[in-house]
Image (cartoon, helix red, strand yellow):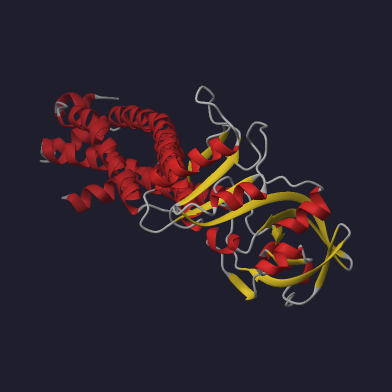
Amino acid sequence: MITEAFRLAARSIIRNKLRSFLTILGIVIGVAAVIAMVTVGQGSSKQVSASVEALGSDVLILRPGRREFGPPGAGGRARPFTLRDAEALATLREVARIAPIATSTQTVVLGNANSSTQITGSTPDWVEVSNWSLASGRNFTIAEDRAGLAVCLLGQTVRQRLFGEADPVDQTVRIKSIACQVVGVLAAKGAGSFGQDQDDVVVMPIRLLQRRLAGDSDVSTMQISVTPGVAVSEATSAIESLMRERRRLTIEQDNDFSLTDMKEVATMLNSVNSVLSGLLSSVAAVSLLVGGIGIMNIMLVSVTERTREIGIRLAVGASARQVLTQFLVESVVLSLLGGVIGILVGLTMAGVASRFMAIPFVADPTVILGAFGFSALIGVFFGYFPARRAARLDPIEALRHQ
């Protein structure tokens, strides 16, 4: 009986192709929107987590100003740090390693090729504190940093633009007036939490950048690796106390610097992302309700159009249950067809968005199966009333219908 019901449902849908497509359009839009929103939301959450993990465990970010979090350079103005601040922090037992950072945007030139990129000045500890590895070559040394020698590390994006597939180690590039020897190439990291290309970078000794590019002794950021076994809260308290002392802040004055635990930032961003994804998905789910109403409407029209057919079936011995099953199956098939198309469209939209936004594509099987099952429930719920109406038709009255 079920097989016959599916066969009749398929024949009815094929016979009215345009009407069937317009009927399931609401389901397609609703399912596609929900799938796309959830998939993109999960991808962005994974991107945030990966970016935090890339910094390593128990890493604190110290910046001037009261900015709590955000992309580099988004905070307010405040008195910058100096290398002496970094040296003082390095004496704390709670601090394992510290990487003071200064930046400058410059054009890196090799022959006829050039690349406008961010130049990061730091110490040799930057590679380890940032949890970065070298694809080839070596890191610059403490002696090279202190002497301000013209050596640098290239990110993969810069290497590709300037050298293609060639090995840049021991080659020389020009940065402004500096002829800089490439001593190493950083391993690829990809996009960061805010969509920036982390591989579009050149790293050099911080004293070289300060003297030859920036023309000052400012340190804009410090990445601090907490000593293993020391609680992050303990390290935070020690760092804040020392920095308040060095910046001569009184008890009444607030901190003019921010110390951020990247794990807390990741948790906050993921929570916000989950709320926004849930809200947008809820709005998109309204289309499912509209689609369900459309299915109920078209099934009522179908019952009216096929009244004589129903009367004939009932007259020749079909039971009310069989008629109810036929129309209920037709409603479910329409809804499931819309669900399948919606899932395919939603995954395609999410794939395009993930590629455009440079975030991972994370297709959750649970969400996909849930959308498919919800489509079936919509078909059952909104198809039951028209099916019951068809099953309750009086055969005599149905046969008289014109």
Decide which of 180, 382 is in the foreground and name it: 180
Task: Report the side of 304 relative to 123 (left or right).
Answer: left
Image coordinates of residue 389 in percent, x first then y, are: 20, 27
Task: Report the side of 229 relative to 158 (left or right).
Answer: left
Image coordinates of residue 327 in percent, x first then y, are: 24, 38
Decide which of 276, 187 is in the foreground and name it: 187
Examine the image and state in which quarter residue 315 appears. top left
Residue at 41%, 48% in the rendered image: 343
Decide which of 247, 116 is in the foreground and name it: 247
155 up-or-down from 256: above or below: below
Examine the image and state in which quarter residue 212 appears. bottom right
138 up-or-down from 313: above or below: below
Decide which of 227, 284 is in the foreground and name it: 227
Image coordinates of residue 253 in percent, x first then y, are: 54, 24
Residue at 22%, 24% in the rendered image: 400
Image coordinates of residue 151 in percent, x first then y, are: 75, 68
Residue 356 visible within the image:
no
Q: In which quarter of the image is the C terminus?
A: top left
Residue 388 visible within the image:
yes
Number of marks present in the image shown: 0
Residue at 31%, 29% in the rendered image: 296
